[in-house]
Image: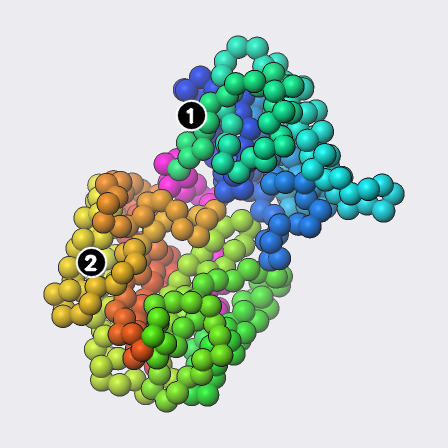
């Protein structure tokens, strides 16, 4: 599981003289191992800290709470990776999870020979209480490696693409439910509840769900959590959905109308739909992110509408928003294997708004759209 990602990481670390490393960013850990802790209710109450991943010159050890070991799947069957657990909840002794995590890290690091080479540590998410453990294990000095895999993560493996496709299938289910739910009198939260129920029934499990469910008559109608605002006749509603399954995220957006759309809504929808189609055609190997962003914004402006204040697009994977960002400053050149969300929009505050979004895989032969839900207004 995720052996290709670990191979890439090993090559990068070796090329930079790193023989040992400690990863503490959950996104890096999911990318390297496929370990996907359940996040429906946030961090586990009995965890002593984030999951950790120890690297010893090509061998990886995942350190997790004992109750979450099953989330590692069959990772321990891989020759280059093993799973080390520590005790969390217990009735036989006090709950001292942070202490037990530190002890587990000490055991794992103590089995490594730390002579020669350099050590790397992801420090941004590492609890300060664990730094003495590293010092006792012989890592008195280390190189900060936060962000080292940002570039590598942009190009997806076949295994990652399969997980992303499974998520995109779930948001398609969600949008079918949204279309059936949107009607005058429904509140934002009513529509959202119908969507979430449909997704979890399809998945046969609990699935975390984001992002926006916003009636167009809101003053701030670009996005937001669903609330009690009710749909009136002809009101638009932006439904932007992200699911998290197997540690990977989806994203999507469709704008619906309760009943028959007004002529203004239909025209705005046409412009945004054309802008999305235009943007998809720009996603080819060699294209620069900021040039794509510039051309799509120009498309909206030349149609006579205010340009959206958010990104034109972004990558998606173990995080819901990752590189490459399709934004004005980004000079990243697109490569085959990148998965990019594109989401142009037009917003008239307090009146109506339209945003549409598709996931696109960059390939040598041109863009491949990975999302297939119905984006019609009615």
Mark pair 2, 1: CA separation: 35 Å
Q: Residue at x 23, y 57 (%)?
A: 279
Q: Which mark is residue 193?
A: none
Give SS at disc 1: helix
The residue tagged 2 is 296
Mark before the other along the chain sequence, 2 or 1: 1
72 above or below 351? Answer: above
The residue tagged 1 is 12
The location of residue 214, given as percent across then percent down, is: 40, 73
Q: Is residue 232 left or right of residue 352?
A: right
Camera-nearest residue between 276 and 187: 187
Q: Residue at x 31, y 48 (%)?
A: 325
Q: Residue at x 75, y 39 (%)?
A: 96
Q: Is residue 370 left or right of residue 189?
A: left
Q: Residues within 10 Å of mark 2 (few under 14, many from 20)?
A: many
The location of residue 138, given as percent across then percent down, is: 61, 16
Q: Is residue 122 magenta?
A: no
121 above or below 346? Answer: above
344 above or below 191? Answer: above
Please state the extent of the stretch shown in magenta in the rendering.
151-175
Task: Answer with the quarter of the image where residue 109 lies.
Answer: top right
Task: Answer with the quarter of the image where residue 68 lies.
Answer: top right
Q: Residue at x 45, y 80 (%)?
A: 229
The location of residue 163, given as percent across then percent down, is: 49, 50
């Amino acid at each position: 599981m995720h052996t290709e990602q670990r191979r890439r990481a090993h090559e990068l670390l070796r090329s930079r003289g790193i023989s040992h490393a400690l990863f503490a960013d959950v996104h890096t850990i999911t990318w390297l191992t496929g370990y996907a802790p359940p996040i429906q209710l946030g961090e586990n109450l009995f965890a002593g800290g984030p999951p950790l991943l120890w690297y010893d010159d090509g061998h990886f050890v995942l350190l997790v709470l004992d109750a979450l070991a099953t989330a590692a799947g069959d990772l321990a069957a891989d020759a280059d990776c093993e799973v080390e657990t520590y005790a969390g909840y217990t009735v036989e002794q006090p709950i001292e999870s942070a202490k037990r995590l530190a002890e587990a890290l000490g055991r794992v690091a103590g089995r490594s020979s730390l002579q020669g080479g350099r050590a790397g540590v992801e420090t941004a998410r590492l609890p300060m209480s664990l730094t003495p453990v590293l010092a006792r294990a012989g890592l008195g000095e280390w190189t900060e490696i936060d962000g080292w895999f940002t570039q590598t993560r942009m190009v997806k493996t076949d295994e990652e693409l399969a997980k992303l496709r499974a998520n995109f299938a779930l948001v398609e289910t969600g949008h079918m439910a949204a279309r059936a739910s949107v009607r005058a009198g429904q509140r934002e939260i009513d529509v959202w509840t119908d969507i979430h129920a449909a997704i979890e029934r399809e998945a046969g499990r609990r699935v975390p769900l984001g992002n926006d469910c916003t009636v167009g008559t809101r003053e701030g109608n670009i996005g937001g959590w669903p609330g009690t605002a009710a749909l009136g006749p002809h009101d638009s509603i932006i439904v932007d959905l992200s699911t998290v399954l197997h540690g990977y995220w989806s994203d999507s957006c469709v704008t619906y109308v309760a009943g028959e759309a007004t002529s203004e809504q239909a025209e705005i929808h046409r412009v945004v739909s054309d802008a999305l189609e235009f943007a998809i055609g720009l996603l080819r190997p060699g294209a620069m992110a900021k040039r794509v962003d510039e051309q799509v914004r120009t498309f909206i402006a030349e149609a006579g509408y205010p340009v959206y204040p958010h990104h034109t697009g972004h990558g998606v994977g173990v995080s819901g928003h990752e590189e490459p960002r399709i934004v004005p400053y980004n000079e990243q050149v697109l490569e085959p294997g990148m998965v990019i969300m594109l989401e142009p929009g037009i917003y008239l505050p307090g009146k109506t708004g339209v945003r549409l979004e598709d996931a696109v895989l960059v390939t040598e032969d041109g863009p491949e759209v990975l999302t297939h839900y119905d984006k019609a207004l009615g």
